[in-house]
Amino acid sequence: MAEPVPLPLGRLTGEGRWSDQKGNGHYSVEFSIERSADGSTALSAHRVFFNPDGSPGGVEDSLTTFQPTFECFFLVRIYYKETTREGNGYCYGGQGHYGFDVDPDTRVEYTWKLGPSGQMEAMGSSTNRGNFTAWSETLQAESDGSLPTEADLTHGS
């Protein structure tokens, strides 16, 4: 049986930046990560995007589940705006990557790396009908003792 995807359990908060051909901006991000008895992991994400004047703009909420399949591989499911999409991913050590197609013209990819003291750095991209968007996020886990074990960090290596 494959081991759980290496993500810190609990609450993580941080910020992100995005850029595309039309502009750029920043947002706050909060993750809540839980693990089920079957080894699957659920990541609930809440992002608040800010307008150029600093006032809150749009909100994005999603749920991502990771189901280990074989060795370092996993099935990923994204629940967003009443739709579900599936893709595949892999992880080595404290790093992971996944990708999925939203439709024939839209692809999303996301990569993360766990750092010291509960830090998580991530970056992603999407191609949406010719518009390429890239983003970067830095999050910090709350100090609640739920950070990955050494076995989690060496999973797949």
Image (cartoon, grey):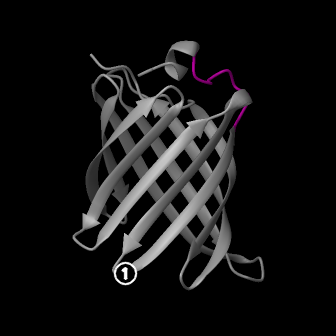
Q: Residue at x 74, y 77 (%)?
A: 55
Determine the image quadrant of residue 101. Answer: bottom left
The C terminus lies in which quarter of the figure?
top left
The N terminus lies in which quarter of the figure?
top left
> What residue is shown with label 1?
130
Tell me: residue 138, above or below residue 61: above
| Image spot of residue 42 (x, y percent) | 42, 38
Residue situated furthest bottom in the rendering: 22
- What range is drawn magenta here? 141-149
- Nearer-the-camera pick, 151 or 29: 151
Q: Residue at x 22, y 70 (%)?
A: 104
Q: Residue 142: say if magenta.
A: yes
| Image spot of residue 38 (x, y percent) | 31, 22
- Nearer-the-camera pick, 86 or 62: 86
Tell me: residue 111, above or below residue 102: above
Predominant secondary structure, magenta span: loop
* Number of marks in picture: 1
Mark 1, secondary structure of its residue: loop
Tell me: residue 43, above or below residue 5: below
Tell me: residue 57, above or below residue 6: below
Residue situated furthest left in the rendering: 104
Residue situated furthest front in the rendering: 157
122 vs 35, left or right, is right
**Other residues around mark 1 within 10 Å, as few (<14) / some (14–19) / many (≥20):** few
Amino acid carrying label 1: it is Gly
Q: Residue at x 46, y 38 (%)?
A: 96
Q: Residue 122: say if magenta.
A: no
